[in-house]
Amino acid sequence: MAELHVLRVFVAPSGTGGNPLGVFLNGPAVPGGRRQAVAADLGFSETVFVDDPPSGAVRIFTPADELPFAGHPLVGTSWLLARERAAVAVLRPPAGEVPTFLDDDGVTWIRGRAEWAPEMDFRQLEGPGQVDALDGAPDGLGFADCWAWEDEAAGRIRSRVFAPRYGIAEDEATGAAAVRLVSQLGRPVTIRQGAGSLLRARPGPDGTAEVGGEVVLDQVRDYPV
């Protein structure tokens, strides 16, 4: 058995939304050859295996593939390490070193580079109503962030992300998309994504981007490996 923590990442202040995430803090308890099958079985958009908590070494799997970098898994893992083990200043997925920190409002942040995020298409629509009306990825795209301004002056965005390429029909909250989008826009934004999630994103130093959000723990259970 391996202990599995189930979180929701990018929860709105009202407690709504948040993207479910599975985290194995004792990653070596799940053999490397089993990890893709475990992620597929769990069915979360991502599952994280923490291979060395003190150094922040992690691996991230979707139901269909391994990712070198992803936003909501890293935000959630940073929060969980601080809660259950010890806070780390850097996480180390395959893409590289990802600084992480907690702000004065209790929001957990990570900092990464847009080029680390998976390739995706961005479709800006005329308004939030058009975003809400979508029934899937437009034009058969494999990974698409469809967004519109709710209030451009205030930096508020409505977004939905579809990722059938990775076995995810619709992602509830996508930190990697926020990293890429804020890098394009060059200004801080607040993103209302999915059914009720809230992401905060802003440009970081030296061409990086930062994404942050609130996290809650829903469940701890044993998983047979």
Image (cartoon, helix red, strand yellow):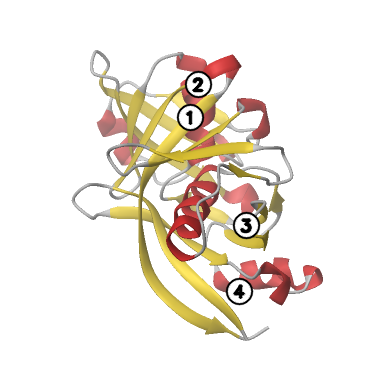
**Residue 99 occupies quadrant:** top right
Amino acid at pointer 2: Gly
**Among the two numbered marks 1 and 2 on one chain, the one whose residue lies closer to the N terminus:** 2
**Among the two numbered marks 3 and 2 on one chain, the one whose residue lies closer to the N terminus:** 3
Going by the image, does 211 lie left or right of 23?
Answer: left
In the image, residue 129 lies at what x, y percent?
Answer: 25, 33
Which quarter of the image is occupied by the N terminus? bottom right
The residue that appears at 24% across and 13% down in the rendered structure is 153
In the image, residue 143 lies at what x, y percent?
Answer: 58, 40
**Among the two numbered marks 1 and 4 on one chain, the one whose residue lies closer to the N terminus:** 4
Which quarter of the image is occupied by the C terminus? bottom right
- Name the element at disc 2: loop
Going by the image, does 93 lie left or right of 136?
Answer: right
In this figure, which residue is indicated by the disc labeled 4? 41
In this figure, which residue is indicated by the disc labeled 2? 204
- Name the element at disc 4: helix
The residue closer to the viewer here, 70 or 92, is: 92
Above or below for 96 versus 53: above
| CB contact under 8 Å: marks 1 and 2 | yes
In this figure, which residue is indicated by the disc labeled 1? 210
In this figure, which residue is indicated by the disc labeled 3? 62
Amino acid at pointer 1: Glu
